[in-house]
């Protein structure tokens, strides 16, 4: 007579699920950080306002803009914000990277000589290429 240890099978399935969830979360964090950094750094800079207003968030997009007396032209603060958000990713989280400046679309259409039209899409493609390597 053969016996099947269903409890052992259930434990093995749960272990696989936990490992898969962890792997998925790590991959999502990697994608978020790569895309955020690429988009932030591709954004043309005059005052740093556009670069600083890439705002990452979990589960719903941010609908406001950052208003400061001075902005970070390097993009370091925006990238650090993404690192903080990425650390909070859980399995099933939706991540958004929003920029609500009224002129961000015009910048992306090529209204700055510092960045080509479609710089957002090009930055996302560059991040995708870096991740796939």
Image (spheres, grey):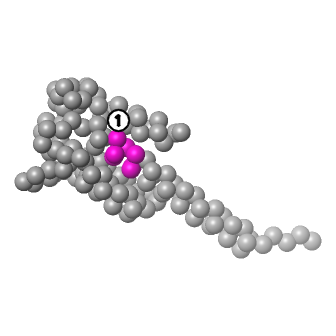
Relative to 54, 102 lies left or right? left
Q: Which residues fall within the magenta stretch?
A: 32-38
Q: As rendered, which of 7 and 56 lies closer to the eye? A: 56
In which quadrant is the N terminus drawn?
bottom right
Q: Is mark 1 on a helix, strand or loop?
A: helix
Residue at the image position 37 percent from the left and 37 percent from the top: 124
Q: In which quarter of the image is residue 114?
A: top left
Residue 23 on the magenta segment: no
By secondary structure, the bulk of the magenta-drawn segment is best described as helix
Whether residue 4 is visible, yes or no, is yes
Residue at x 52%, y 39% (from the top left corner): 132
Residue situated in front as seen by the camera: 100 or 35? 35
Q: In this view, does 110 lie above or below 104?
A: above
Is residue 37 found inside the magenta-colored segment of the image?
yes
Residue 89 occupies quadrant: bottom left
Report the residue at 25% width, 48% height from top.
75
Query: Going by the picture, which residue comes out furthest to the right?
Result: 1
Q: Where is residue 112 in the image (x, y as percent from the top left)?
A: 17, 28
* Location of mark 1 (residue): 123
Foreground of the two, 9 or 114: 114
Q: Does residue 14 appear to the left or right of 30 in the view shown?
A: right
């Amino acid at each position: 007579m053969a016996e099947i240890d269903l409890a052992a099978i259930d434990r093995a399935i749960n272990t696989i699920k936990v490992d898969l969830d962890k792997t998925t979360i790590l991959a999502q964090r990697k994608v978020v950080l790569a895309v955020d950094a690429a988009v932030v750094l591709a954004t043309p800079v005059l005052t740093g306002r556009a670069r600083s207003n890439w705002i990452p968030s979990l589960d719903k997009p941010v609908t406001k803009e950052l208003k400061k007396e001075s902005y970070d032209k390097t993009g370091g603060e925006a990238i650090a914000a993404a690192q903080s958000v990425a650390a909070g990713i859980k399995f099933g989280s939706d991540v958004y990277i929003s920029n609500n400046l009224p002129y961000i679309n015009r910048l992306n259409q090529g209204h700055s000589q510092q960045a080509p039209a479609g710089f957002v899409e090009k930055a996302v493609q560059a991040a995708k290429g870096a991740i796939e390597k």
